[in-house]
Amino acid sequence: MANTITGFLERLTAAAGDYNKAKVARLGLLGSVYLDVRPAVARQGQTIRIYFPDVAAMTDQANNDWTPEDLNPGYVDMAWGQRPGKAILVRDFEQFQTATDILDQFIDPCYKRACEYANGAIAALLTAGNFNAYPALQSATPASIPIGTAANAWDVLTGAKVPVQDPASCSLVVHNNVHRNMLTDSNWYQENLVGAVIANQTRQNAADGPGTPPAFNYTRKVDQQMPTSTTANLTGTIAVTNGSTAVTGTGTAFTTQAPVGSWIKVATDTAYYRVEAVTSDTALVLSQGYAGTTGSGKTYQRVTYTSVAMNKYAIALAVRPLELVNNGSVQSRLVMIQGLPFRLMLSYQHLKAGWLMTLDYAMVAAVIRPDFGILIQS
């Protein structure tokens, strides 16, 4: 059995090496924050110190009149509290004959879930309580960010001397539904607003989402985990038919409460639908057929989306490996996957007659510079 475990661990190491050579797209938020990854082992409850660039202004020293200060860089203390992980039961190592088998069946899905977990933890930080340096901007266009609102966000941050000159460090992160509406806003592509080169590249690559050419030094990124909320039930009730795009209202005010571009939902459903056209206060058209149950007298709600314009030092994500355990019944290895340190552990479970294979890591995310970001509600 020991040889089987050793062989499996060797194949897994090879699979991780192959995986690291591939290009793996990061989620929007995960690639927009300050990532602090170090080899030091994390322990539950341990506090670590995250440093970020912050020094006092320089002064004229023409007369060699130095006034030295103690080195005191900006930092924030963060306590470990999350240990994301995944466990599967392996009864036969023969199912992992090659490194490719391990990559396809275990490493790839686990890595994606690990990224989703960390990305979700970052998204949960996008609240008015955490980003309290400036009031959130309110978009005048539902489920979209007009270029004027993006410019206002840029004005706020530059006015506060936030470094926004580097598109690699500054991001405008939006929900995919917001991005979809922004693609139909021709103002984003007008050369007199964003420049000829950006306009041309954006027209060619607009639907790509992540990596969209920057405007106002933001790199626009799309993230499905951006926070959303629903309004209270809107005025009146609606009638919908399964498979139909037509919505008929009774006592509704569609032109003001559900304008074109809005995303709405029947209060008792979970699916959102984009408003494609509004013909009156009591008649609108959805962009796709209604998938729910036909009926009338239904209450409905509109979705509000939170976006963020920020420098990466607004939020820090710290990731550390966990302590390795190796004894007669447990074997573990440190595996680096796309720059993140994971602990792979194997332990035999007699009651289940198989090997428990776990992959976990330690992480904590926190807002460290609330003045380096501003929220946008739409």
Image: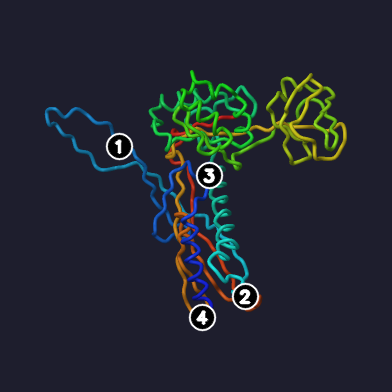
- Say which amino acid is labelled 2: Asp
Label 3 packing within 10 angstroms: few (<14), some (14-19), many (20+) = many
Q: CA distance from mark 1 to mark 4?
A: 54 Å
Q: Secondary structure at mark 3?
A: helix
Pointer 3 with pointer 4, Cβ within 8 A: no
Q: CA distance from mark 4 to mark 2?
A: 13 Å
- Callout 4 amino acid: Ala
The alpha-carbon separation of the residues under discs 3 and 4 comes to 40 Å
Tell me the quarter of the image containing the N terminus: bottom right
Q: Nearer the viewer, mark 3 or mark 4?
A: 4
| Distance CA(mark 3)–CA(mark 1) | 26 Å
Which residue is tagged 4?
Answer: 2
The earlier-in-sequence mark between 3 and 4 is 4
Q: Which residue is mark 3?
A: 122
**Amino acid at dot 3:** Ile
Q: Residues within 10 Å of mark 1 (few under 14, many from 20)?
A: few
Residue denoted by label 2: 92
Q: Which residue is mark 1?
A: 55
